[in-house]
Image: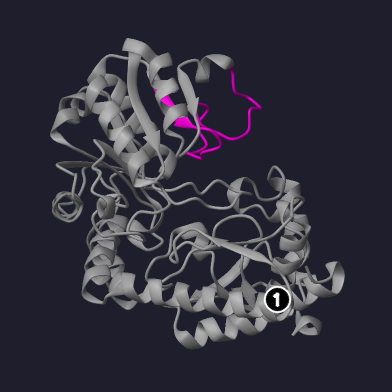
Amino acid sequence: MTELHNLTEDHAARRRAAKVMPNGVYGHQSAISLLEGFPQFIQRTEGCRVWDLDGNEYVDFLCGYGIVLLGYHHPLVDAAIEHQMRLADCSNGPGLVMVELAELLVETVDHADWAIFAKNGTDATTTCVTIARSGTGRRKVLVAEGAYHGSAPWCTPRMNGVVDEDRAHLIKFRYNDTASFHAAVEAAGTDMAAVIVSPFRHDARHDQELVDPDFARAVRRACDDKDAALILDDVRCGFRIAHGGSWEPIGVKPDLSAWSKAIANGQPLAAVLGNERFREGATKIFVTGSFWFSAVPMAAAIATIHALRDEGALQKIIAAGDRLRTGLAAQASSYGLTINQTGPSQMPLLTFAGDVDLMRADLWARTTAMNGAYLHPWHNWFMMAAHTADDVDRALLATDAGFAAVRDKFGAD
């Protein structure tokens, strides 16, 4: 398929974009950081497939960087969107659907007693931090080194335009390192407002690392001892790991949690969920946005949560991820290549042993894309319920070409 992979229209669109937007396309969906072979623009989506401007078709394992959980154009979600759109979307006040969604989330998510809605993951994490400071009257927030919690000045991974004061009250620790965490708690002293932590370590350009339950319990105990907020950043993982929150399986409840990405199967929505301890803190802050009360994404979220339960979506996602991983392991072995597969099956990542500069990963992912499967070289992937066994097997034809290219250029291990 490599000979048929043409990006002529995509490149023309990039040139147009560069004239009227910084870097052409900015932020996490900029393809500048990816090598040749990846499209910048997507023309059409359906199920688990995407098509670029040149008509190239890909089995998609990025899911819009995690926003699609069930599949593109899921019929029940699309029906809910269409119905709510005919009623009202943005107006002078929210629709009743906002209350219905809050009720459903409180029913579904183990630790939640109330909900606040927004648009982006950054909205949610920032609101959580603000509520924690409001509820405790303190300033210090503990964050893991290298963790991504959004693009606001307090948490963006790039420091251009950021001043020291934006981060004056952040204290770093190493994920899963209890001693490092306790040192950060000691440094915060009596001014500790919160700890914000992801359900597992999913830093870009690194192997993923599942949470050690003992570490999670240590964080919970420290927050209890200090009367501080445990904030779980579930923006990336929410509903892909467990229905009731990503730490539900290990029995650790946060005080506040941030959600976005897949909760409305691609519609723009974020949520902050909290317990009674921080209800008063939440009532005292002012957060809002012109489109935060949009009813259509809320209707989509209700349909998504019901489909997640009723259709056994999580089981389908895990099965597809397991099938993909089994196939990748067999292929790498057949080419004499050593790979690491990390993270949960629902959010997998593949890296090559000794690939410090990521050149093997770049070549592998680029060749795979040119053969019809979209897998990122250094950001974790996402599985969706629309991935069937046939879709995974088709993608494995593309990944086989990627492994062959790596072996041919770099040799076997």
Tell which of 252 and 152 is nearer to you.
Answer: 252
- Tell me which secondary structure the magenta stretch mostly adopts: loop
The residue positioned 49% from the left and 65% from the top of the image is 63
Quarter of the image for the N terminus: give it.
Answer: bottom right
Magenta highlight on residue 97:
no
Q: Per the image, is 149 magenta?
A: yes
State the SS at label 1: loop
Q: Is residue 203 above or below residue 167?
A: below
Q: Name the one closer to the observer, 72 or 194.
A: 194
Asked whether 250 or 31 is in front, the reply is 250
Q: Is residue 62 rendered to the left or right of residue 77? A: right
Q: Which residue is drawn at 53% across and 52% down?
A: 208
Indicate left or right for 158 with 196 as reference: right
Residue 273 can be seen in this image: yes
Name which residue lies at 33% across and 33% down.
219
Is residue 321 rendered to the left or right of residue 364? left
Q: Which residue reaches farthest bottom?
A: 390
Residue 80, image x, y percentages: 26, 68
The residue tagged 1 is 54
- Which region shows up in magenta? 141-163
What x and y, as percent, mark residue 255?
A: 24, 35
Q: How many labels does the image show?
A: 1
Which image quarter holds the C terminus?
bottom right
When the figure is inspected, residue 175 is found, relative to residue 354, above or below; the finding is above
Q: Where in the figure is residue 41, as x and y percent of width and height?
A: 64, 64
Residue drawn at point x = 74 percent, y = 78 percent: 335
- In the rendered view, would you say 33 is above or below 220? below
Residue 404 lies in what quarter of the image? Answer: bottom right
Identify whether 206 is placed above or below 189.
below
Kind of residue sitting beneath label 1 = Asp
